[in-house]
Amino acid sequence: MRTDDSVSSLNENSIINDKIDLPSLFSIFLDNFNLLISAFLVGIVLSSIIYLSSVSIYSSKSLIEIQQQENMFENSIPGFARNTENSLLAEVAIYKSRNTLDDVVKSLEDDVNIDIEDIPSSNLIRSNLSVSSNGRSLMTIIYNHSDPKLTEHILNLLNQEYIKDRRDFRKRSTAAGREFIKKEIPKIKQSLKEAEDKLNNFKLSTNDSGLIFETENRSSELNNLYRAIDDIEFKELELKEFYKTNHPIYLTLTEQKNFLLNKIKIIESDLPNIPNTQRKLENLKREVTIYSDVLNNLSSQEINLAMAEASSNSNVRIINKPSNAVKIQPTVYVFSIPFAIIIFIYLIQAIRHFLGDKITNYDALIDFVDKKNVLGELPLYNKEAKEPSDDSSLIAEELMNKIAYEITHSKDQLSSISIVGSKKGVGKTEISEKLFYKLTSLGKRVCLLDLDYKKRDLTLKSFSSEKTPKDFKEFFQDIDSYKIEQSLFIPSFDVENSVEFFTSDEFASEIKKLKEEYDYVICDTPPWSLFIDAKIVSRYFDACLYVVGNKISTFKDIILFNKDLESFEKQKSIKYFYNKFDVFFNFFWYRYHYPNYSDNYYYEYSAYGNLKEEYLFRRIFNKILELFNKLRNKQS
């Protein structure tokens, strides 16, 4: 992309070809207004059909809690300890089980106030039932149904059946537990009695009072005997100084010492048997303790189960009762579909505009090449139109006045202009002709050359003559027939090779003379990207007026055109012209002015007055009147 003044300073690496600003967004909206309105109306119709024809669905919601065994007696009940996340998954399955659903259907069938035709099947209830859990203690239940009264009622029955099932399960579990305990307690008592008998018999078989009554063991007894012997020996030492060994007191001490030594000997002789005896004693005592503990636990559980069986509550608590049935389908939100459709279409069109290569509005052009380089614009209009709605010609006339003023008062050198365009159909010939007549009407001496030898529209349509000149010499012989006031039109010559003719010295000298004789010299050229003629001819002129056709020319065309001009020795003044834009956006039969060209903004057309609502209502009135006349003629 060129970085000089002729091309905008937009980033050449940018993927968008237009600035995302309010004018561009509004222009996209107006360009696609009819499409958006049509899509919106179609969306309204579809939404209405969906809303009116769809079966109404109502929803009711409930919240229940599964208590996590906080009561003392429930901790020991089989099947009631559910402290893991999987516990609620089981409860969800129980809630949606076939037994629960069948019981609900049966309750509905027994209700005389409900018609049998309105009762849903268990499969239908399951499909419309949603049960979710937080993984710990709460379950959320949502039920959807077509009848608002039955919706809340069915959800209430589901909760009741689920609670009843959990209560019955509790009672069945406690009853089975009590029956088991009643059978086991006598067995445990008999086992305890046998263990106690074995323990007592073993104690008696040892003939050891300390072991029988468990008051003293052998280790402590030996210690006591050794201490007694020490006391006797101490007394013997004291008596040796006062008594003889045959004294009765001394003999008594000796006998006591011998007795204690004999007893120690007996105890020490029995020491090898002590570990086995003690082990048997501990095993028997442990067996008695086990049976005793089991008996106590069974007795406590029997009491707890009896209390649980007598209870009328389950471990399920309803936090939120079933809510009132609320309509969830279809709702008024279905009418948001048309808005979603038009937003989607608008976004698609916006993407096409900003990423597409074709130039579709004036704002995109001035953003790309800079506003000071855009000479003017011209709308698409019908020259022969007489309807007030086709007043584009009036706007075109005003815009041509503006363009002529810009040319005659420009600081750039615009006395000789080549009208160029990269593609055919952009309107080069039309602009050349209109510019020629406009400058002529302002009293300027203008020379218009038809150098588009590939098409010759100006020569054949606008300035047709019986004979086409072959060169400048033949042309000057009949020059008076090509003069219009002070201006001159030079038609396409009948030459064999246009390239040779444009590069000849004759052509260069004649163009130089024309530039000296006339105030403005304008030439129409063939498409720039298709033929070399335009590039050759443009070298003889001071400025190039590049015509951008609305939805025809592309940004790439402008880039390539600027690159071609870089090869010129003399820098050309480049101006751009936006052509064939539509002044109106359409709403069915009604054509409405774009804001930039509506009355009360830039222009006021007194010839037609207000062309907005006035024209719309006039058209409607004329249609009604026409229809009325037809009916009256048929009757007559």
Image (cartoon, helix red, strand yellow):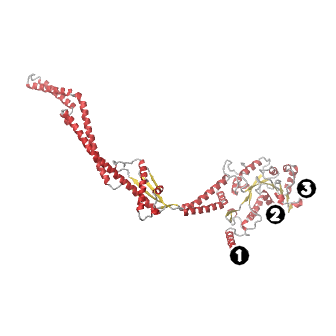
Disc 3: which residue: 474
Is residue 446 visible in this depiction of the protein?
no
Q: Identify the residue at image location x=85%, y=51%.
A: 498
Q: CA distance from mark 2 to mark 3?
A: 28 Å
Image position, residue 232 (x, y; %): 14, 27
| Mark in front: 1 vs 3 | 1
| Of 303 and 564, the residue lying toward us | 303
Q: CA distance from mark 1 to mark 3?
A: 65 Å
Disc 2: which residue: 441
Quarter of the image for the C terminus: give it. bottom right
Query: Left of 551 or right of it: where is 280?
Result: left
Assess disc 2: are there few (<14), some (14-19) or many (≥20) residues with their C-alpha within 10 Å of its C-alpha: some
What amino acid is found at the position of numbered circle 2 in the picture? Answer: Ser
Disc 1: which residue: 633
What amino acid is found at the position of numbered circle 3 in the picture? Answer: Glu
Q: Mark 1 falls on what kind of element?
A: helix
User: Relative to residue 287, is residue 476 depicted above or below?
Assistant: below
Query: Left of 78 or right of it: where is 275?
Result: left
| Of 285 and 237, the residue lying toward us | 285
